């Protein structure tokens, strides 16, 4: 066996195979595109979304669906056996989040999954969601709190 150890043909074949199969570039790409949530792109973000339990496509129920309920002003509720309890199964439209918005949603959901829900932490979440707007959470009593938005939030 030692007679083949220094064979130039075999050494060149091994070197060529090593260059073709070298996984270092693939490992770096996987880390950058999938594993690191701060640099991950679509495929990697979809994996992270499944891990933390959020979806890139958000279903939006239509505003004009009548459902069973109790509205006081204007009086528009419907009795039993007239309308469904919810608009589930209705013609939902879907909103596809961009990579940056989906990354933000993943980070917020991950933080909500692992951090303690105190007023300071909730205010940190709100600053992550609305970085350039005034929104805050105040404790208003025992086991009571209130969100204050100093702007009108839009649907997205």
Image (cartoon, rainbow, N blue to C red):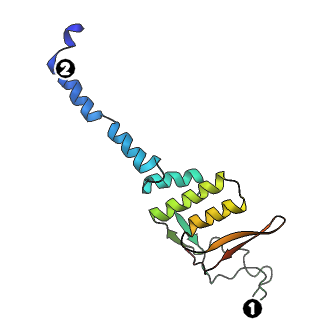
Q: Residue at x 49, y 65 (%)?
A: 101
Say whether residue 37 is left or right of residue 6.
right
Query: Could you say where residue 25 lies in the image, as x and y percent from the top left?
Result: 32, 41
Query: Could you say where residue 140 lies in the image, as x and y percent from the top left?
Result: 80, 71
Q: Residue at x 62, y 62 (%)?
A: 124
Q: Which residue is mark 1?
A: 74
Up-down relation of residue 4 to residue 62 (above or below): above
Calculate the distance from the C-alpha at mark 1 to the C-alpha at mark 2: 86 Å
Count of numbered labels shown in the rendering? 2
The secondary structure type at the circle numbered 1 is loop
Say whether residue 136 is left or right of residue 20.
right
The secondary structure type at the circle numbered 2 is helix
Up-down relation of residue 95 to residue 30 (above or below): below
Q: Nearer the viewer, residue 67 or 40?
A: 40
Mark number displayed over residue 109: none
Query: Could you say where residue 144 lies in the image, as x and y percent from the top left?
Result: 80, 68
Residue farthest to the left, as pictured:
8
Q: Residue at x 61, y 80 (%)?
A: 151
Classify residue 5 by image quadrant.
Answer: top left
Residue density around tag 2, few if under 14, some if 14–19, many if 20 or more, within 10 Å: few
Mark closer to the chain start, 1 or 2? 2
**Which image quarter is the N terminus in?**
top left
Classify residue 127 by image quadrant.
Answer: bottom right
Q: Residue at x 20, y 25 (%)?
A: 13
Query: Could you say where residue 45 lies in the image, as x and y percent from the top left?
Result: 48, 55
Say whether residue 154 is left or right of residue 33.
right
Classify residue 86 by image quadrant.
Answer: bottom right
Up-down relation of residue 78 to residue 146 (above or below): below
Say whether residue 36 is left or right of residue 50.
left
Q: Which residue is mark 2?
A: 10
Residue farthest to the bottom, as pictured:
74
């Amino acid at each position: 066996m030692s007679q083949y150890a220094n064979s130039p043909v075999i050494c060149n074949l091994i070197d060529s195979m090593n260059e073709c199969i070298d996984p270092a570039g693939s490992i770096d790409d996987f880390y950058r595109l999938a594993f690191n949530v701060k640099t991950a792109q679509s495929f990697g973000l979809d994996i992270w979304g499944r891990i933390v339990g959020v979806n890139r496509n958000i279903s939006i129920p239509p505003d004009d669906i009548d459902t069973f309920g109790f509205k006081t002003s204007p009086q528009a509720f419907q009795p039993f056996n007239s309308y469904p309890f919810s608009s589930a199964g209705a013609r939902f439209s879907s909103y596809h989040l961009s990579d940056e918005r989906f990354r933000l949603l993943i980070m917020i959901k991950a933080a909500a999954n692992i951090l303690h829900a105190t007023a300071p932490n909730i205010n940190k979440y709100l600053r992550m969601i609305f970085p350039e707007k005034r929104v805050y959470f105040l404790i208003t009593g025992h086991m009571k709190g209130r969100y204050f938005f100093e702007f009108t939030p839009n649907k997205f």
